[in-house]
Amino acid sequence: MEKKLNHLLADLVVEYHKLQSFHWYLKGYHFFDDHAKLEEYYDAIAEAVDTVAEDMLMLGFKPESTMKGFLSISSIEEAKNQEVTSVEAYEAVLADFKYLLDEVKGVKAAADESGDYLTSTKMDDYIEFFSKAIWMVGQEVR
Ligand SMILES: [Fe+2]
């Protein structure tokens, strides 16, 4: 579980920075709406980062806390320091959120198997968050 939770933590940290990069480097039509929406998403992810790390501590695990460590563990590709259109940003967000939804479902399944109900229950929040966000972002880019 410790390894799975650190992988999730690292993916969430990298996704947080990626969303903030898109928030900063966004250009074009819909800027005002999408700039705000991306901030809403990275705020939600920041909350999840803190919750996952603190739940790990409650369980006696050691959460990763260095940028170097997060980057070495994460499977999410970082954003580049370059301008993006809303569609480019949302297509990347959609792919990442689909990956993260699969990941939190996997963490829940593993948690259930080992009787770790704290983690299992928490994953329900993220399954709901990513499922809803995937539907909404999917509507935006179609
Ligand atoms: Fe901002």
Image (cartoon, rainbow, N blue to C red):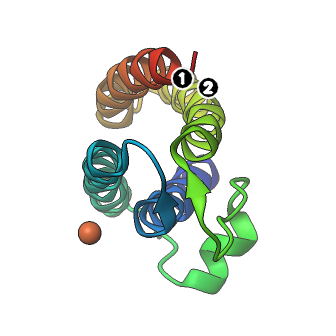
Q: Is mark 1 within 8 Å of ligand 1?
A: no
Between residue 61 and residue 21, name the one nearer to us: 21
Q: How many marks?
A: 2
| Residue at the image position 61 percent from the left and 72 percent from the top | 70
* Residue that numbered label 1 is attached to: 105
Q: Is residue 18 above or below residue 66?
A: above
Which quarter of the figure has residue 77?
A: bottom right
Q: Are marks 1 and 2 in contact (CB under 8 Å)?
A: yes
Label 2 CB, ligand 1: below 8 Å? no
For the residues marked 1 and 2, what is the alpha-carbon distance in whole angstroms?
5 Å
Q: Give the x, y percent position of residue 29.
A: 43, 44
Which residue position holds label 2? Answer: 102
**Quadrant position of ligand 1:** bottom left
Residue 85 horizontal side relative to residue 23, left or right: right
Determine whether, in the image, residue 53 is placed left or right of residue 32: right
Q: Sort mark 1 into few (<14), some (14-19) or many (20+) by Cα contacts within 10 Å.
A: some
Residue drawn at x 29%, y 55% is: 39
